[in-house]
Amino acid sequence: MVFCSVTFAQQEPQYSQYMYNMSTVNPGYTTGQRGLISTGLLYRRQWTGIEGGPQTANVFGNIPMSEKIELSVNYVNDKIGDAIPVTNDYINVDFAYITRISDQARLSYGLKTGINSFKINPSGSDVADDPAFADNTSTTQLNIGAGLFLFTSNFYAGVSSPNLLPSDIDIEGIGVAETKTHIYGIAGYVFDFVDEVKLKPSFVVKQVIDSPFTFDLSLNSLIYDKFELGVSYRYTDSFIALAGFNITQSLKVGYSYDFSVSELSGYNNGSHEIVLLYNFDLLQFGNKHTSPRFF
């Protein structure tokens, strides 16, 4: 009680391959391809070697309903902690309305709604005898978010907040956490570098109310429209190696490895992340798309 300090910590899941699951942070994100349902699976193991390091699983899908309306569904399971495990389950549905602002550019307005289930499991810990931690406890919160997403066939930019309702998390009258508003800015571009090689620079800026500013800078190269190699840097945290492979026209797999450069670098073996993307061409529209999307 005599000595105290202020610390800042990660509250929501972070992704090294953010360019492939942007609907997680921006409800305005759209694929803009009628007839193509874009789905994905992502798993991230952060700070391997540290007991209780974050583990995140994400299932997502984008469903164009018409030229102007697109829906997306997102489920995220995020776990952290060893002695007292904490689990967050996010289930969200996004509604995006797309407007055409020029021959090439479109702007979408996104609204996110969903719920967050917050669970604590102290039953196997040393504090299980404390009445405050006697049982596995949970609570559910409403989640509302919004975002804008501007895009062409080779450029995108957006600003968003996936949770506009900061609140205190209380379980049986005991305050256990406080959610904060997160603000994201994201942008990327695809351009031809040399024959059969495209460069895909991108960045994401993250700001949490009352916490330090941070960002990711990334550069991917797409070779023969099949292979991707890239690097990324997360401010004061890590360098990241990125790789991807288009197995078929509809199926893509990606992998990233984070090399920690923060004060945690001596205590963990890096972070692993793998993503699997698949497009369902239900209406056989794939052969009609003359402007393929690269994000």
Image (tube, helix red, strand yellow):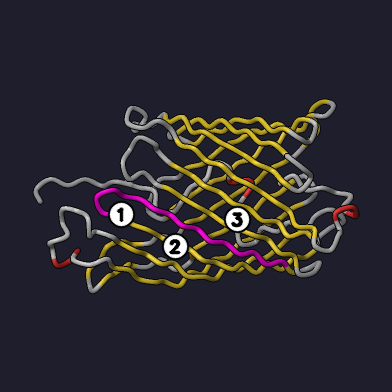
What residue sits right under mark 3 in the picture? 159
| Image spot of residue 86 (x, y percent) | 33, 57
| Image spot of residue 59 (x, y percent) | 57, 57
Q: Distance between the residues labelled 2 and 1?
A: 13 Å
> Label 1 amino acid?
Pro
Q: Quadrant of residue 3?
A: top left
> Label 2 amino acid?
Asp
Q: How far apart are marks 3 and 2 (CA)?
A: 24 Å
Query: Observer-nearest residue: 265 or 157?
Result: 265
Question: How packed is label 2: few (under 14 Cα within 10 Å), some, or many (20 or more)?
Answer: some
The overriding secondary structure of the stretch rendered in magenta is strand
* Relative height, residue 54 to residue 169 (above, below): above
Sequence-wise, the earlier of marks 3 and 2 is 2
Which of the two marks, 3 or 2, is nearer to us in this view?
2
* Relative height, residue 100 to residue 190 (above, below): below
| Image spot of residue 105 (x, y percent) | 80, 55
The furthest residue to the left: 2
Sequence-wise, the earlier of marks 3 and 1 is 1
Residue 76 among magenta residues: yes
> Label 3 amino acid?
Val
Q: Which residue is drawn at 54% across and 46% down?
A: 205
Q: Residue at x 44, y 67 (%)?
A: 116
| Image spot of residue 51 (x, y percent) | 31, 41
Q: Is label 3 in contact with label 1 (beta carbons under 8 Å)?
A: no
In the visual, does 122 lie left or right of 44?
Answer: left
Q: Distance between the residues labelled 3 and 1?
A: 32 Å
Tell me where the magenta segment starts and ends, as one range.
Answer: 70-84
What residue sits right under mark 2 in the picture? 89
Label 3: which secondary element = strand
What residue sits right under mark 1 in the picture? 85
Residue 135 among magenta residues: no
